[in-house]
Amino acid sequence: MARRARISPAEAGLPDGGARRRTPGLRREEVAVLAGVGVSWYQWLEQGREITVSPQVLDAVARVLKLNAAERRHLYGLAGLNPPLPEAVDTDFCDGLHRLIDAWMPFPAHVMDAYWNLVAYNDAAGLTFGYSKDDTNCLISFFTSPLYRSRTNNRAELAATVVAQYRATASERPDDEGFRAVVEELATVSPEFAALWARGDVEASGQTQKEIVHPTVGSLHFESTHLRIPARPDLTIVLHNPLPDTDTAAKLERLTSPQGRRDTMRPVAG
């Protein structure tokens, strides 16, 4: 009702009715007609009755009421449906995320979407894990990138955790083809992943300890933390924090320095 009240007939492309109109905003029957649904059905929807609701109809109602992305997702939740993935992030938001992970320097940080596609990463992550333009998905790179594989020390334990966490993420959207596509693609090229996925283990993302053996600075010990972004629930910031009582922080300072970057670009013996 509140959303109807804020939309004038003129904004919806209807005659305003002049001074005789007493209803602020749109009437129920006007919303129903513009959305292409029955008046009684729309009234039941507004009253929260037990009716069958489809995403297509909710999208039509959202369009008529000019709901923003957050309001549209909220409407889905009220109707008992899984909210759609948030729409594309505006430029200012993207720039803010880049500034955030760059401010985490000299520690590694990256941003990934719901499918663990790599959205952005800072220089420390590129230097530490060997990320490049060829790395498009964190899960796929973990199992298929020779560079990443060669730098992961506690690989067997970490691989099982990574797969269990991905299953937990995918279970939030059991019918989402995006997760299925990633799993099927990776299972065809990585027997290791296929075997771990078949185990059916599930583990919530949170904090994970990992050791990376870098060819220039040696062992790096991290606590990896996944942080969801309320404005974009499909995006996750992954921060790698040096474990206490290790020399990881000092090594990262050296690795990200101009000399460290030059050393990383040189071939390493052995």
Image (cartoon, rainbow, N blue to C red):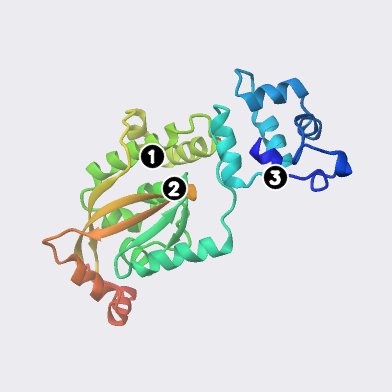
Whichever of labels 2 and 3 marks the residue nearer the N terminus, that label is 3
**Image location (x, y in percent) of residue 265:** 34, 75
Residue occupying the point 33% across, 60% down? 129
Q: Is residue 44 above or below residue 243?
A: above
Q: Which mark is residue 6?
A: 3
User: Quadrant where the C terminus lies?
Assistant: bottom left
Quarter of image, res 254: bottom left
Residue occupying the point 27% across, 57% down? 151
Indicate the amino acid at tag 1. Tyr
**Image location (x, y in percent) of residue 240:** 29, 58
Residue density around tag 3, few if under 14, some if 14–19, many if 20 or more, within 10 Å? some
Indicate the amino acid at tag 3. Arg
Query: Do the numbered discs 3 and 1 sit on residues whose CB atoms are within 8 Å?
Result: no
Residue occupying the point 68% across, 36% down? 59
Q: Nearer the viewer, residue 123 or 233?
A: 233
Q: Residue 116 carries which label?
A: 2
Would you name the residue on which mark 1 appears? 166
Residue density around tag 2, few if under 14, some if 14–19, many if 20 or more, within 10 Å? many
Query: SS for tag 2?
Result: loop
Q: Can residue 86 be seen in this view?
A: yes
Residue density around tag 1, few if under 14, some if 14–19, many if 20 or more, within 10 Å? many
Query: SS for tag 3?
Result: loop
**Image location (x, y in percent) of residue 114:** 47, 44
Q: Estimate the spatial distance between the alpha carbons at disc 2 and disc 1, rounded to whole Å.
A: 8 Å
Whichever of labels 2 and 1 marks the residue nearer the N terminus, that label is 2
**Image location (x, y in percent) of residue 251:** 20, 70
Q: Estimate the spatial distance between the alpha carbons at disc 3 and disc 1, rounded to whole Å.
A: 42 Å
